[in-house]
Amino acid sequence: MSLIAGSYEKYIWGFKLKPLETPYLALTPLFSYPSHQSPITTVAACGHVAASGGADDTIHLYDLPSASYLGSLHDHSSSLTSLSFYSPPNLSFPRNLISAASDGSVSIFDADPFGLLKSIRPHRKAINDLSVHPSGKLALTVARDECLAMLNLVRGRRSFCCRLGREASLVKFDLGGDRFFMVVEDKVGVHEAEDARLLCELENPKQKRVLCAAPAENGVLYTGGEDRNITAWDTRSGKVAYCIEDAHSARLKGIVVLTRNDGTASGDDPFLVASASSDGVIRVWDVRMAIKEKPNPLAEANTKSRLTCLAGSSLKSKQPRSGNSSIQKEQDEEMEDS
């Protein structure tokens, strides 16, 4: 398992999570260097590949097993605000990279090799967040124009847009893709994915802004932000399941649910959640302990920088790559049919 964090000081940080003396783990450094010319605003990871986007309008790519730099993409003309990989469930490497920027544009890249497939502009103002459906065929975006947009990634166009009347900062599909979560300041709306119907609203008890969120299994959603807590919500009941209070000394900027997808996971494996804060610290928690009492972190690393984002990846053995991405293949089939 690997963690990748970006910082205001332009540094990219990579760590590998290794077993230590039970029950503790170790965050072993993979790499750290100033990869961007401006602050890093977003990171993403999938399998053996990671990506970072910055205020310098570029995307940088990394190979995690070799801790090497793969190159950069210069297809955007404004600051990157969100990155997301898409990978089919049975593959260990991404098929596509989808990026969003502050000029309201979204770009779709093939990941083998990395090349631009399509650029669209679903919003008039900066996009705050982007979430790709588990099928890889559509995505949701929220932006400063106070709109929610749905994108058809196969055809490369906007298929739906609605005005919210208020600016949403985050949007996340759940793991099954049946629902999505949308954050507006200190509130999280739980919506039906089919018609965007509001099912319930989760409100931070301390009325502090939610800055990061990560869905997990069984309808659980983890949130963090200005309250410095990691809160686990039962989105079916709309109530707090448990909370790690004062998880950091400053606001949380990233949460990652670390799951093992190599086929060897069992009920004895700890359920791991990683968090990053603007205090520069990355921590890994066994959240099962939080149900009973405040847990101690299983692993910790201090980057001594102002962290802005966090992503995680579960590594598996490499598999042979196919010639075309899933999105590219469907685009080609549509052109042949027409």
Image (cartoon, helix red, strand yellow):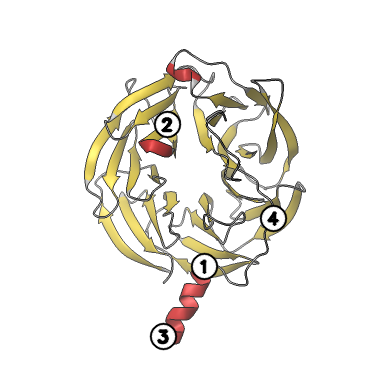
Task: Check disc 1 and give the amino acid type.
Answer: Ser
What secondary structure is found at the residue carrying circle 4? loop
Residue 112 falls in image quadrant: bottom right
Q: Which residue is mark 2?
A: 223
Question: Which mark's residue is nearer the viewer, 2 or 1?
Answer: 1
N-terminal-most mark, 3 or 2: 2
- For residue 318, the mark is 4
Task: Check disc 2 and give the amino acid type.
Answer: Thr
Task: Check disc 3 and give the amino acid type.
Answer: Asp
Q: Which residue is mark 1?
A: 326
Q: CA distance from mark 4 to mark 2?
A: 32 Å
What residue sits 55% from the left and 56% below the top?
90
N-terminal-most mark, 4 or 2: 2
What residue sits 53% from the left and 16% below the top?
295
- Near mark 4 (Cα within 10 A), the count class, few <14, some 14-19 or many ≥20, is few
- Residue 130 at what x, y percent from top left? 44, 51
N-terminal-most mark, 2 or 1: 2
Tell me whether the residue at label 4 lies in contact with that at label 3, contact meaning CB atoms closer than 8 angstroms: no
- Residue 333 at what x, y percent from top left? 46, 80
What residue sits 48% from the left and 67% below the top?
119
Q: Which residue is mark 3?
A: 337
Q: CA distance from mark 4 to mark 1?
A: 18 Å
N-terminal-most mark, 4 or 1: 4
